Each structure stands twice: as structure tokens, then as C-alpha cells.
Image (cartoon, helix red, strand yellow):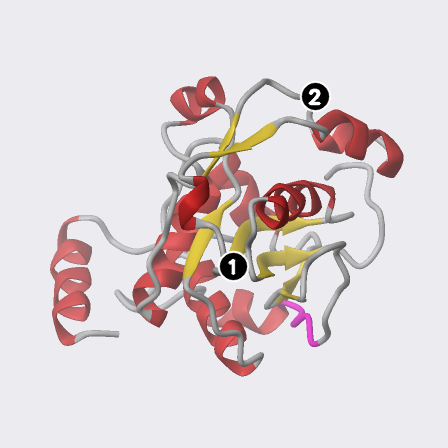
Amino acid sequence: MSALYVFLRHITALIYPVRCPVCNKIIGATDTFCDKCQSELVKYDSYFTIPQVKKSVAPYVYNDKISPAIFLMKDGIGGNAPYAFGKALAETIKSADIQVDFIVPVPIYSQDQCRRGYNQAELIAKETGRILKIKVRSDIVYKNRKTRPQKELTKSQRKINLKGAFSVNNKSEVADKRILIIDDICTTGSTVAEIADILTKCGADSIFCACACKTVFERKNL
């Protein structure tokens, strides 16, 4: 973390206090979660498999302890969550020795982004990229149509729901590149698998995935 970035966070915190994205308690300018919430978060200390993805990692298990931070972002309130998740992802990616040319955040449909005001995966990716000094390419993949919420579908239905929902811009810039896909939550991996498939077809050298949270079993409320 650069000295300038730390200085700017401290200055901003004087006007807009930094709050824990789980419990909303005021915390230090460079803190991610409050001590209590941090101690209750469950580390995801393994790898998971997604088709056409070389390695997939996540810093946290998705459960009721961390879900408030995710719900805030999905409700259009970023707060400190992107910074907290971005920092955790950066540490996890370094530990996993993942080396890539650029980061691609999982896109959301344009109407959904207008309603929310941002793409939460992009905010997390930018924090991760800033720490790791890896360029974030939000212009590479876009979502070309509205899809049903994945949380409403079974594993097999999720694959069908997303088929053909993503497209690639700047295809020539994908060829022979090592690409890291970043998202907020990974449940079945269907979304990342669909994006990995189209990037592979465009000639990507290798695909990696890093998600802020990973479910360890199927949940009806995801």
C-alpha cells in the first residue's frame, strides 16, 4: 500500500469515517473489518475446480458472518467492502503464486449496473489490481443480455441461463494472455466457467479465478 494511498484514506476518513462492512462499526482508515468480525470470518484454505480455469482461489468461506458485506454491495452500498475484499484477494493471489497479464472482473448487465451505480466485482478487482500492480481490463468482457438471478436456479439451470450471455471485446488482446477473472461470490462456478470458455476460444493462454467468497455447499439464498 503506497504512502500516498494511505494518506488519502486517512484524510477521507476524517470526513467519511470508515466502517466495518459487516457490522457498520467505525474502524481505522486502513482497516478492513473490525476485530470482532474479522475473528469470526472463516478462511477458505483450499482450491476449487472450474472448467477451463487453471487455478481458483478465495480468501473467505461464504456464510452468515460475511454475507452482510456482500449484500451491501449488491444493494448499491459499496462502503469499505471492496477495499476489504480487494486486500484479502491480493494476499490470497500472492500466496497462490498466480501470475497474470491482466484482471477481468465478472461483468453485470448494463441496466443492472445503472440501477446499482457500479459493478461490485469491478470495484473489488480495482482494489486487488492496485495492490498487486496488475491492470484491470473492464473493457474485455461484457454481458450482452439480462439473465435470471443465479440464486433462483439449480446447478444445471445456471449453465443454461448463462449460455451465450457474455461476449468479448478486443479479441486480439486476449490471445496468448494469462487472465485472472475476479468475482464476489462463487457457488457452482457457472459464471466464471462461461467467461473462461469464451476467453479460451479467443486464444487466451491460461485462465485463473479469484473470488472474494466461496460457498462450501449449495445454499438456496445465494
Was residue 43 drawn as part of the magenta stretch in this picture?
Answer: yes
Label 1: which residue?
180
Question: What quarter of the picture does the C terminus occupy?
Answer: top right
- Tally of marks: 2
Q: Residues within 10 Å of mark 2 (few under 14, many from 20)?
A: few
Q: How far apart are marks 1 and 2 (CA)?
A: 25 Å
Q: Where is residue 66 in the image (x, y as percent from the top left)?
A: 60, 55
Is 74 or 130 nearer to us in this picture? 130
Location of residue 118 (image quadrant): top left
Q: In this view, does 187 lie to the left or right of 96?
A: right
**Residue closest to the eye, 128 or 84:** 128
Dominant SS of magenta comes to loop
Residue 148, which numbered label? 2
Which residue is depicted at the point 48% across and 45% down?
A: 121
Amino acid type at circle 2 is: Arg
Instruction: Work out whether 50 lies above or below 78.
Output: below
Location of the N terminus by quadrant is bottom left
Question: In the rendered view, does 16 fall on the left or right side of 181?
Answer: left
- Which residue occupies 47% across, 76% down? 91
Q: Where is residue 46 in the image (x, y as percent from the top left)?
A: 73, 74
Q: Nearer the viewer, residue 39 or 195?
A: 195
The residue lying at 47 percent from left, 40 percent from top is 73
Q: Give the range drawn in magenta.
A: 41-45
